Image (cartoon, helix red, strand yellow):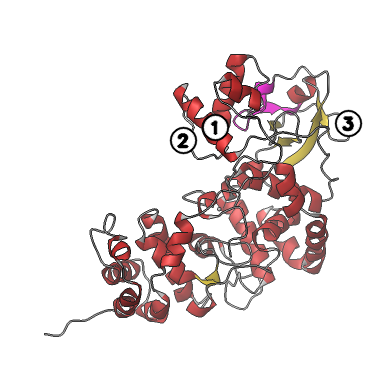
Amino acid sequence: MLLRFSPFAILALLATITLASPAFAQRGASCHNGMSFPQFLASLEQDAQKAGVSQRAINAAAPYMVYDQGIVNRDRGQRVFGQLFTQFAGRMASEARRVRGQQLIRQHAEAFARAEKEYGVPPAVITAFWALESDFGAIQGKLPTLRSLVSLAYDCRRAQMFHDEAIAALKIIDRGDLTPDEMIGSWAGELGQTQFLPRHYYDYAVDYDGDGRRDLIHSAADVIGSTANYIATGLKWKRGEPWLQEVRVSANSSLPWDQADLTIKHPRSQWATWGVAFADGKPLPSDQLPATLLLPMGRNGPAFLAYDNFGAYTEWNNSLIYSTTAAYLATRIAGAAPMRKPLTQVAQLSFEQIKQLQQLLMKAGHDVGKVDGVLGQQSRTAVKAMQVKYGLPADSWPTAELLARMGGHAAASPAEAAAEPVTPHRTAPRTALRPVQPRF
C-alpha cells in the first residue's frame, strides 16, 4: 500500500529532521493535538483547500512552508523598549520624514487625489503610516513570509491567528498578486510598504496602477490606494473630520485632570471653558465637535485634542506612543507647526518601577492586565484611580510620589523610560506583533 504525502508534508518532514529537538517535537503538541509539524502542514493544506485555495498555489508555496525555530524565538523573546513620547516622536516623526512625505504626495499626486476622492483619507494620513512602517518602502523586512507564518502557526502562543494569516497568504498567491518568493517581509509575517498582515492584504489591497496585481511591495500607487482603503473601510475613518491637534492648557485652568482620558470625550466648547486653547494660543472653536484631551506624558508634557478619527490610529497600533506619533506626523506633513517642547523635564518611572507599581495597583484591587512593566491603558486607568484617592492631579501619569504613597521605593529617573510597546493591527492588536525597535 502506497501512502500519499502532500508537498507540504514532504518538505516539512525534511525540515523537521534538520530542526528536530525535544523542545521542537513538543512545540505544537498542546494546541495541535500532538501533531508533528508535517502533520500540521497536511492539516493546513486541507484547510486551505476548504477555503478555496487551488492546488497550484499550494504546490507553489510548499518549498517555503518550513519551520524556523528562530522566528518562534523572536516572537517569544520580544523585548519591550521604553522611550518618552517626545523622544520617540522626535526620532520617528523627524523633519526629514515630513519633507519626504510632502515630496511623495507631490510625486504621486494622481494616486493620492484618487484615494482621497474614493476613500476620504487625506494624503498626509497615508504618508505618515508609510513613513513609520517602512521608511517609505526602504525597510520592508528580509524574512520569507510563509516560513514565518507557518512557524508561528505551529507555535501555541497565537496558533489560530497565524493559521488564518497563513491561509490568507496562500490566497494572495492564488489570486496572482505575489509569488511565494516575492513574499519577503517582517519576522511576524507582515508585508509591503505599509506592513499589512496577509488577511488585511487580501481584504483591502487594491490595484491602483492597473497592472492586474495588488502589489504592496513594489507599487507606490497600490500602496497608496490600499492603505486608504484599509484606513477608511477597515478602521472606519470619517471623511472630512480631523484626527489630532496640539493644544495647550492655561496655567490658571480649571481643568479637572481626570477628564484627560481616551475614554472620555467632551465638546470643544467645554474644553475651551476649562482653559484649553490651540498650541499657538488661539481659542478653540466653541462648537460641539467631540474630542478627548490626550496627555501622553501627563499634565507636564505635550497635550493634544484627539478626535474620533484618532481611533483609526489606535486600531492600527494600540500603543499610545506609536499611534500618537503617527497622528502627529500626519499633522506635520499636512502643514502643522512643530510640537511645543515641555517647559520642564518630565520624569518617567523605569521599567522595574512600573512593574512594582503594577503589583501595588493589583494589591489595591485594580486590573492592570499583565504585570509587565508596560504602561498600557489598563495601567493608566488604575494610576488615575489611585491619584484620585491620594488627592494627586489625576492625569494618569505614574510618578515617584504615587509609587511612594503606595509603599514603593526608588526615585524616578528621567533617563529611564517606562516600557511601552510601540510597533502592530488587527484581530490580535498589531502591537502584539511588533517590538519598538526595527524588527527586520
Residue 321 position by quadrant:
top right
The percent position of residue 258, horizontal first and vertical second, equals 65, 22
Question: Which of labels 2 and 3 is toward the front?
Answer: 2
For residue 325, above or below residue 383 = below
Q: Amino acid at mark 3?
A: Gly
Disc 1 or 2, which lies upstream in sequence?
A: 2
- Image quadrant containing the C terminus: bottom right
Residue labelled with disc 2? 369
Residue ID at (23%, 58%): 33
Q: Cα distance, mark 2 to mark 3?
A: 39 Å
Q: Which residues are magenta?
A: 257-268
For residue 391, above or below residue 324 = above
Q: Cα distance, mark 1 to mark 3?
A: 32 Å
Q: For this rendering, which residue is in front, 16 or 321?
A: 16
Q: Cα distance, mark 1 to mark 2?
A: 8 Å
Residue 281 is marked as: 3
